[in-house]
Amino acid sequence: MTLVPIIKRDYICKLATEGKRIDGRKFDEHRKIEIETNVVNKAEGSARVKIGNTQVLVGIKMAVGEPYSDSPESGVLTTAAELIPLASPDFEAGPPRENAIELARVVDRGVRESEVVELDKLCLEPGEKVWIVFIDIHILDYDGNLFDAASLASLAALSTATVPAARFEVGEDYPLPLKDPPISCTSVKFGNFVVMDPSLDEEEIADARLTVATDKNGDIRAMQKGLNGSFTREEIQKVIKVSLDNGREIRKQLSESTGK
Amino acid sequence: MKVDIKLIDDNGKRLDGRSTEELRKIKIEAGVLHRADGSCYLEWGGNKVLVAVYGPREAIPRHTQNPLRAIVNARYNMAAFSVEDRKRPGPDRRSREISKVISEALEKIVLTEQFPRSAIDVNIEVLDAEAGTRCAGLTAAGVALADAGIPMKDIPVACAAGKIAGQVVMDLGKEEDNFGDADLPIAISPRTNEILLLQMDGHLTLEEFNRALDLAIKGCHTVSEIQKKTILDKYQSVEGVE
């Protein structure tokens, strides 16, 4: 850790002992979320999500292609993330590195494992032709917690997507078949403190990170721990509870802004 | 490919209802990103472009540094979902070329000699594309540079003219670009009318070229007014600053 983060860390930890956070939030409180859908006309579905100053744009494109040989009757889902240099002074141009790949894979898992997109309904000719769904994550402004912003934007974009069947001359356009989405909530730990929805300052000094995706029934659908710190069992249970509470609220906002 | 598409109707109106000398609708917003030193969001017809400026900062890698002045690195990038068929992420030959000509246009206008050894990075992201993205990108870059407080001789601005159905027209739209006869995007310094960028493809007679150039310059001046208004609107209303 270089000098500035050490000073920052001392300050943030000192605030935390007084029960405060650097931007005045409570430990279990997320920043203001804004969801805007259908922001890109050329995309099959799109959404811009702001969590505080963090801004992520996700576009969905679809094409007709070949299925994987081990699942000849289901559509194909691919997720890509780009940490473009527009979003932060520290991001560099070039092919995706570790961080971008982890981000894309965590979002991909959240979408895939929860079976939000009903891939079995995206088959045109078994073994020959299926729909390929591309989720492209574009980070526009990086102020911490890309995991939650990217997941939420992906879900919002998917839920407004239309299958462009007419353009590919395989029938009429119809909405992308979807199930209830799981909501991801990320917390970080520094010292003995665990806070929800880390800002960039908190993320930079964090020892450990935990993302929990929960569904409508309160079940856990995906988790990812990151960084080289550790959590105790009690802390993990607390993070899950906070993720459930916040997830409920965010799910409501998502369904209001997508009309689903 | 021969396509039966009437680009100008009997009343002299174009496909989107514009007259021959009319620009598409333009909307510009300055200072939209938190992390960037300067930024701009611009909508030009169906184009949506976001630009972030970082710098002046140390040029990396070091061999790119110029001991006498700053370098301007424009990076034009299209989002995968910005076009009809998904574009593979990352730079291709087209975007590298556009990045180069935009960088060169901006280097002429920025007072680069004030910042030796540094780089000014201009990131142009095309989020939604509908013909004329390089003009939209350069115009947005002008506003973002001003928003970042980078000293410039002028605010650069771009606009295109072209030829469709035998007539010279302002600012080609999607179908006009695909099925028209010529496209002439330019960028100028509006104060002096110096031409900073010029590209042309298609077929124009000398007379038509002159008409198209005049029309594009006229368009640049119209867009320039919108740029200036955007910046004034943002900074005139700043209150509580001592």
Image (cartoon, helix red, strand yellow):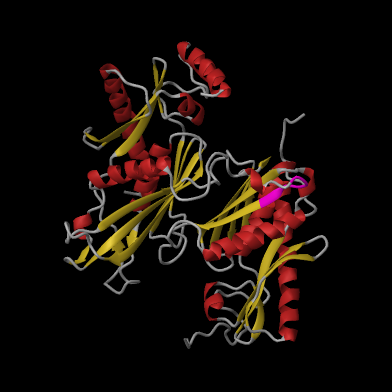
Q: Which residue is painted at 55% across and 40% down in the image?
A: A88
Which quadrant would residue A247 be assigned to in this image?
A: top left
* Location of residue A100 in the rendering, given as x and y in whole percent from the top left corner: 42, 43
Which quadrant would residue B61 be assigned to in this image?
A: top right
Q: Is residue B68 magenta?
A: yes
Which quadrant would residue A72 be assigned to in this image?
A: bottom left
Q: Is residue A114 magenta?
A: no
Q: Is residue A26 visible?
A: yes
Q: Is residue A141 left or right of residue B60?
A: left
Q: Compared to A139, does B156 lie above or below? A: below
Q: Nearer the viewer, residue B155 or B223?
A: B155
Q: Nearer the viewer, residue A110 or B120?
A: B120
Q: Is residue B26 visible?
A: no
* Location of residue A10 in the rendering, given as x and y in whole percent from the top left corner: 52, 15
Q: Which residue is painted at 53% across and 45% down in the image?
A: A92
Residue ranking furthest to the front = B63
Residue ranking furthest to the top = A18
| Residue stretch in magenta | B67-72
Q: Compared to A24, does A147 lie above or below? A: below
Main structural element of the magenta stretch: helix, strand or loop? loop
* Location of residue B19 in the rendering, given as x and y in whole percent from the top left corner: 64, 77
Q: Is residue B146 left or right of residue B135?
A: right
Q: Compared to A109, does A159 lie above or below? A: below
Q: Is residue A136 left or right of residue A76?
A: right
Tally the marks.
0
**Quadrant location, the C terminus of chain B:** top right
Q: Which residue is painted at 17% across and 66% down in the image?
A: A127
* Location of residue A188 in the rendering, given as x and y in whole percent from the top left corner: 39, 25
Q: Which residue is painted at 46% across and 31% down in the image?
A: A31
Q: Nearer the viewer, residue A103 or B8?
A: A103
